[in-house]
Amino acid sequence: MSVLSPTGRAFACKTSRESIDKANSGLLDTGVIRWLLGLGWSLLAGHFVVGLVVDGLREQIRAAPEAFDDAVPSTWEPDPRIPSWAVGLIERLFFTLAVAFDVSGSATAMLAWIAIKMAARWNRLGKPDAPGALSIALGGLVSMFFALTGGAICRGLIRP
């Protein structure tokens, strides 16, 4: 294929779609790009999507008059002493690395972590809060999904 330059001279263009795909594939095979994409997916995309899901669930809970009593604080309201974004970031980083390095029992550990988080908050104010527990469980599952898929991208099991 030849292309005309601005001066009118013809020159050969050897760039094809196949060579671009081959070059991109070579970058992904180095591992650095794969790891950056996997960690970015898990930590950054996971942070924003989990926030949207949990905030959306909590807005739905607040909209139901029988589920939210303003006189009694709910067990699922964030503890101001422990930033939930930091807990989510650390848990996604930990489990992303566990999946990326193929640590045995990673899936079991993910579900156990969600159970531990729920158990720690279940009777925080003396009474169980089923809607709040559901928002915590679903937020944890979404967070673990991003950790799992981010780790799979780092390992090369999922090609972006």
Image (cartoon, rainbow, N blue to C red):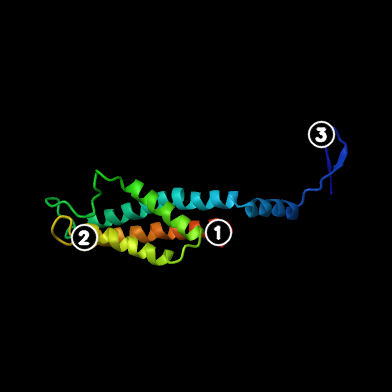
Residue 52: x, y in percent?
37, 52
Q: Quadrant of residue 62?
A: bottom left
Q: Which mark is residue 136?
A: none
State which mark lies toward you, 1 or 2. Answer: 1
The reply to whether callout 1 and callout 2 are in contact (CB within 8 Å) is no
Q: Earlier in the sequence, mark 1 or mark 2?
A: 2
Against 7, residue 85 (above or below) is below
For marks 1 and 2, give the CA distance.
Answer: 35 Å
Task: Provide the residue designation for mark 3.
Answer: 6
Dividing the image into 4 quarters, which one contains the C terminus? Answer: bottom right
In the image, farthest residue toward the front? 104
Classify mark 1: helix, strand or loop: helix
- Compared across the picture, whether 143 is left or right of 76 comes to right
Q: Earlier in the sequence, mark 3 or mark 1?
A: 3
Task: Provide the residue designation for mark 1.
Answer: 155
Task: Provide the residue designation for mark 2.
Answer: 122
Q: Residue type at mark 3?
A: Pro
Residue shown at the point (42%, 66%) measured from the top left: 107
Q: Residue 128 or 30: which is nearer the viewer?
A: 30
Residue shown at the point (46%, 56%) measured from the top left: 96
For marks 2 and 3, give the CA distance.
Answer: 71 Å
Q: Is residue 135 visible?
A: no
Q: Quadrant of residue 129?
A: bottom left
